[in-house]
Image (cartoon, coloured by chain):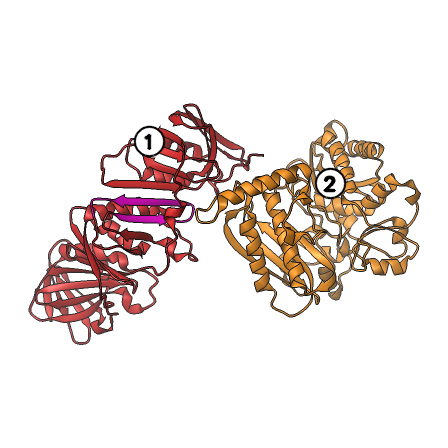
Chain colours: A orange, B red
Amino acid sequence: MGIKRAIVHMDLDTFFVSCERLLDSRLNNKPILIGGTSDRGVVASCSYEARKFGIHSAMPMKMAKERCPEAIIIKGNSGTYSKYSKLVTDIIADSAPIFEKTSVDEFFLDVSGMDQFFGCMKYTQELRHRIMRESGLPISFALSENKTVSKIGTGEAKPNNALQIDYGTEKQFLAPLSIRKIPSVGLKTYQTLCSLGIKHIHTLQDMPVELLEHTLGKMGSSIWKKANGIDHQPVVQYNERKSISTERTFDRDTIDIVKMRGILSAMGENLAYQLRRAGKVCACVTVKIRYSDFQTKTLQKHIPYTAADHEIIPLVLELFERLYDRRVLIRLIGIRLSHLVNGSFQMNLFTDDSKLTDLYQAMDKIRNQFGDRIIMRAAGLEARTIGRTNPFNGEPPMLLANRRV
Amino acid sequence: MNFVVSSSTLLKHLQTISGVLTTSNSLAILDNFLFHISDGMLNVSASDLETTMNTSLAVEAKDSAKICVPAKLLLDVLKNLPDQPLTFSFEDNFSIEISYTNGKSKMVGFNGDDFPKLPQVENTTSIIVKGEIISSAINKTLFATGTDDLRPVMSGVFCQFSPEYIVFVATDAHKLVRYRRTDSQATGSSSFILPKKALNLLKTTVKGDEKVKLEYNDSNAIFTFNEIVLTCRLIDGKYPNYEAVIPKENPNVLTVDRLSFLSSLKRVSIFSNKTTHQVKLKITGSELAISAEDLDFNNEANERLTCSYDGEDMEIGFNSRFLLEMLNNLETEEIKLLMSQPNRAGIIVPADTDNENEDILMLVMPVVINRN
């Protein structure tokens, strides 16, 4: 048996709300909703005061407003949150031996072996106090033998508290909790398990693993292991991006093909720019559409490695053309570029690539200096609200909407 | 009927045409050789519908016959027999018996009339070309052909005949080779695209000292040399205007020893990204610096070479595979790399030439280097 691991999961409490409160103290102790303000919007984050009304993340904003009409609704500003997230990341990077940032407000730390010198719990408590002192943001954590138990533990520790799950007590700790608390048990799996009469983790623990595998397939054994507090995943400091993507949900479902083609062009143009900025090329393009009845379809195509607008955009439009075959309103469109490698674009003899690469280099230079939206194809002018952040800054992708706690 | 033939002679002939056979034939009959015996001559054919190869040899036979013989069985047994006379006998029910010193083997063939007929090639133009020209043209150009199914014309070699010279061109849109010979001419001007498979077969069968008779029309070409006849269907389509993409002026001229450039590139490219194979050439004064890096693994390599250079300082990126293939397919001691801009095509030509009738030009598109 090797050394017992000590894994910490840290999570900033109601992160977006805490950030807003730092900026405006009048928001303290009031129900606050952050998220899309339109009727289509969902709650991205809400204060504990709002949760009393039965509001939770990912709830449609319309429903949240009905439940708590006096709540203050804030649109949210991902720039501000990223800034605070970076502040906290810097503090953790400064003192932790190995850490993994899994989202804007969540971190895993591997503090194995710290017991010899500091005491794992004492060390992490000190770090937590330092984060709260220096950033002003409340943060909770749990310390245990592995990632899953720590993550579930943090959920139990919240708000603004810490929890240690001693070695050997993981199973007892998990036993009374709802199966919903297990990461990777979503609404669908939860319903499946509920229909089998499984509500609490202790039931899962007592079940033979084969039975779960029979019902849930591969997922079954992974869920069973998690329920028993078994998880050998290491804390990985850096995750290479395997793909970059962007998507857009319309305020109102649409069949305006011209508008959608414009948005897809703008998305393609922006993603191609992000590739070139990071010195990468991609070999697979995927287009996704979701109809108003939530039927979701994707279509992808492999191409020679490229980062050129004139190869990506026409392909995106062609895939969209082939994909959109029902005369039904569309709710969402998106693009993903995958199979990324470091490298640059191989020019073609028979297209006018020399001129175009000159053009891209000039445009990229202007964008680097004055911002993404300063220069673009006219077709994409309408698309104002597509995400335009640099996906290769080593940060996990920013999730504003549809976020699950 | 029966006939007698030397086992090694037959094997030699069968092996020259067995390249036509494929494992995934659309018609089962194409897994056979067609044996056609008449007037003491055995004519053997193999075909995949696109390409057909014939060879003929003298045998001892009294009658004539036409029968399909399973190719793999026949080749396997011949390969394992020492040289000796074999007696083939065919029955009316298409059973085939081969008798040799130690015994005999039997197999079942098919009706020779079921074998696909050769297309009638009419209204042909013909030209006699030296085998050496054909084989060096194929060797120099074939590597540059493309593999993209969506652009079939680029999967073949474009042949252009004119009263002044004959030209062979291959390109995959990233690299291009133009091989021109002035020591062979045609009477009129014409052009066609030869498919890769036929070229590969010619590459292995044309030795160099024979005369090759080439007949062609709009849809087919026939190569006749020694006892072999190769008939192939031409690739239908319009070849891209390659002359238009060859830069007329590339003022920056690098002259470098081919083998030292080649071996440096080989070493440096080991450290390049495994999927893009990109290397960077930086030329300042009379120094050529070759570098590559693979950010994913923190691999990198740098080498320096002395060269003679006439032009502005230059930094240009290439796919090292393309450069290696090109340098490998040249023979001269020194080569010239002519460039204009880091995002314009580079041209590689031999610095000096032993054969004044031969004109080779290789074109390679760079990869864009981030200049920001």
Residue B323 image point, x, y percent: 39, 38
Residue A296 image point, x, y percent: 65, 63
Nearest the viewer among B17 and A197 is: B17
Q: Main secondary structure of the magenta part?
A: strand
Residue A95 image point, x, y percent: 74, 30
Nearest the viewer among A374 and B306 is: A374
The residue drawn where x is 70% and y is 64% is A254
The residue drawn where x is 55% and y is 47% is A308
Q: Secondary structure at mark 1?
A: helix
Q: Read off the chain for label 1.
A: B
C-beta proximity under 8 Å, tags 2 and 1: no
Residue A157 image point, x, y percent: 83, 44
Q: Read off the chain for label 2.
A: A
Q: Secondary structure at mark 2?
A: strand
Tell me the quadrant of the picture where the C terminus of chain B can be found.
top right
In the rendered image, residue B337 lying in the magenta stretch gets the answer: no
Between marks 2 and 1 in the image, the one whose residue lies nearer the viewer: 1
Q: Which amino acid, mark 1? A: Leu
Tell me the quadrant of the picture where the N terminus of chain B can be found.
bottom left
User: Alpha-carbon distance for marks 2 and 1?
Assistant: 54 Å
Label 2 sits on residue:
A107
The residue drawn where x is 15% and y is 74% is B91
Label 1 sits on residue:
B259
Residue B78 shows in this picture: no
Looking at the image, is A293 positioned above or below residue A302? below
User: How many numbered circles are shown?
Assistant: 2
Which residues are the magenta region? Answer: B165-184
Left or right of B293? Residue B158 is left
